Image (spheres, rainbow, N blue to C red):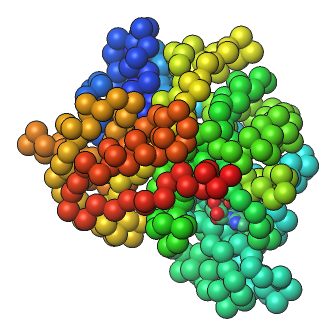
Amino acid sequence: MKVLIVGSGGREHALAWKIRQSPRVDTLFCAPGNAGTATLGTNLPIPAEDVEGLANFATREDIDLTVVGPEAPLVAGIVDVFRQRGLRIFGPTRQAAEIEGSKIYAKSLMQRFHIPTAQSALFSTPEEARAFLPRCTYPVVVKADGLAAGKGAIICRNEGEATEAIEQMMVKRIFGKAGERILIEEFLPGEEASVFALTDGTHLLPLPSAQDHKAVYDQDRGPNTGGMGAYSPAPLVERTGPEKIRQQILEPAVAALAQEGRPYTGVLYAGLMIQQQEPKVLEFNARFGDPEAQVLLVRLEDDLIPALEATIDGTLDQIRLRWRKEAAVCVVMASQGYPGPYEKGKEIQGLEAVAEMEDVVVFHAGTALREGKVVTSGGRVLGVTALGETIAAAIERAYTAVKQIWWEGVHYRTDIGQKALRG
Ligand code: AMP
Ligand code: GLY
């Protein structure tokens, strides 16, 4: 079969790597892809947000299955467009993806269906939002309603910081339309964890636990990024109880969306804050996490294609997936300056040596080919992913590989996975 993967990050390289191993797949395209996906299939010069362009390509090439990595095309309705044209595609519809695309919609759904989450108030004007601040207990979290590339939640320690966050989002409009409406939310103490499940709208197939590290520097210092590394399994989720999370959060969310006439098909990702084993939802996402997908997919023993198809066909109850017992760790290597401005075009050295290592896969994110050489072309550049008997062993193997890779200005955290060892 012919498969098209939409996106260009480490998550999409990991999807391409896994899907390429399926005996059923003979042709793979990636739009737009990166230097890593180029080794597995054909990269297309079509941006992930060009829904019409992608649908035209899929129609013309008779693509059997399209798999969408990032949120932007999902929220823009790529699944609806493909379905209208009779094309098979993995991901939620525009209305179902609103669970990620609008934090206000997600919050309202959680409140109406009693899914545990932080208390929160909604504002459509800066005046109303500012007037609310003297009544708050600090810290609070100010959140833009729409997509803001992972930067739309600002933790404010006092009224001054909250006033500034409101100014940035609603007056200066740093996130454009995404900040037209905001939530001001109770700050939840605790530890963060992520859970993922495939769902066909009715049935739920939870995936193993995984956790990312959002802050750019060691010890969770510095600004948040898309994720500087990840590990799986996540002891915090295991301790809290995957079954409890399924019953309190994942099942009610899937049922709520179905009841609202927005049945959800695809990967449902819940970002949780857990305190004393009680999970509350910080956010839902409509896709795999990046870099969580990297650590999940290297642990998957079975073919991914039947699970993706069953998700589309509503037959997920017939799928069982087997996972490797080993732990996986992914260390993201980034450009100096990320998540702020950074330089591109730096030649990456050491990839050949690491390619020889057993149980290590280097997933590309912001990379490109220039005159036959792999160069940096984004903020997050590589996700060096390793398996090990334990998380400690996987950490050691991942960093052994990381130390062999270099480019001018490379930055990575040195403590990926340590959170898991602390228990
Ligand atoms: P979100 O985009 O809603 O996931 O928020 C991004 C990050 O902000 C989360 O990963 C948390 O670290 C933090 N955050 C968001 N909401 C809250 C909250 N209510 N309490 C504490 N931290 C939060
Ligand atoms: N790693 C966080 C995310 O994918 O949103």
- Above or below, 403 against 65 in this view is below
- Above or below, 206 against 76 in this view is above
Q: Residue at x 54, y 67 (%)?
A: 219
Q: Residue 387: x, y in percent? A: 47, 34
Query: Would residue 340 be visible to someone looking at this image?
Result: yes
Q: Residue at x 77, y 23 (%)?
A: 203
Taking 112 as reference, is 357 left or right? Answer: left
Dividing the picture into quadrants, the one containing residue 197 is top right
Which residue is nearer to you in this view: 332 or 326? 326
Q: Residue 333: x, y in percent? A: 35, 54
Q: Residue 353: x, y in percent? A: 21, 38
- Above or below, 74 against 128 in this view is above
Q: Report the number of numbered marks.
A: 0
Q: Residue 205: x, y in percent? A: 71, 25
Query: Would residue 312 be visible to someone looking at this image?
Result: no
Q: Residue at x 73, y 52 (%)?
A: 272
